[in-house]
Image: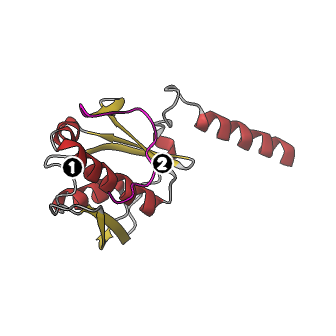
Amino acid sequence: MLAVALAASTLALVACSSNANPGLPSNDEGNMSNEPTESTVTLYLPDWLADANGFNAEQATTDGTAENIIVLLEAKEALPKGSALISFTIDGNSGLVEMNSAFESGVGSKGTIGEYLMLGSLVNTLLGYYELDEIWITVGGAPLETGHNMYDYGLGFFEGL
């Protein structure tokens, strides 16, 4: 009986890790770890000074959802106005963030340093809060493309400039 239960568990894990988009983590809503739980998040906010040197860490209270974290980042002007989360999925140590087109066009209009700081703010905040190794960002189901770069790979922690 135990062997049957273990075999079924293994099959379920394999089925959950299947991926229709090679290279991207799955977007299986069954893997979402995004239930509301009030807690503290470290927001990595861009240093917008003329000598921008990276990020300033600031503590904030969140309901624990990725959507709320995006709202907090936008309110702190770390993300472009109108940015919205479409979906967030965790697959192992990777997070898949589907953002709206306002995010893509806003990030692309900020120049290379602004792009770096905004993406770093989003990625570092989510990596830290959810204890992940990488974040994949898509818009309309395709990798984020800003005009400066196409982000068709997982993003790790952004260091200062």
Q: How crowded is mark 2: few (under 14 residues within 10 Å), some or many (20 or more)?
A: some
Q: Residue at x 66, y 39 (%)?
A: 12
Q: Nearer the viewer, residue 68 or 4?
A: 68
Amino acid type, residue under disc 1 in the picture: Gly
Q: Position of residue 159 (x, y in %)?
A: 39, 58
Magenta residue check for 59: no
Disc on res. 123 = none
| Span of residues in magenta | 146-161
**Residue 1 appears in view:** no
Q: Residue at x 45, y 36 (%)?
A: 153
Residue at numbered disc 2: 134
Where disc 1 sits, the SS reads helix
Near mark 1 (Cα within 10 A), the count class, few <14, some 14-19 or many ≥20, is many
Closer to the camera: disc 1 or disc 2?
A: 1
Of the two numbered discs 1 and 2 on the same chain, state the one appearing first in sequence: 1
Which SS type dominates the magenta stretch? loop
Q: x, y percentage for residue 131?
A: 50, 60
Residue 6: in sight, yes or no? yes
In the rendering, at what x and y percent does residue 75 appear? Answer: 17, 61
The residue sitting at 30% across, 49% down in the picture is 119
Image quarter for residue 16?
Answer: top right
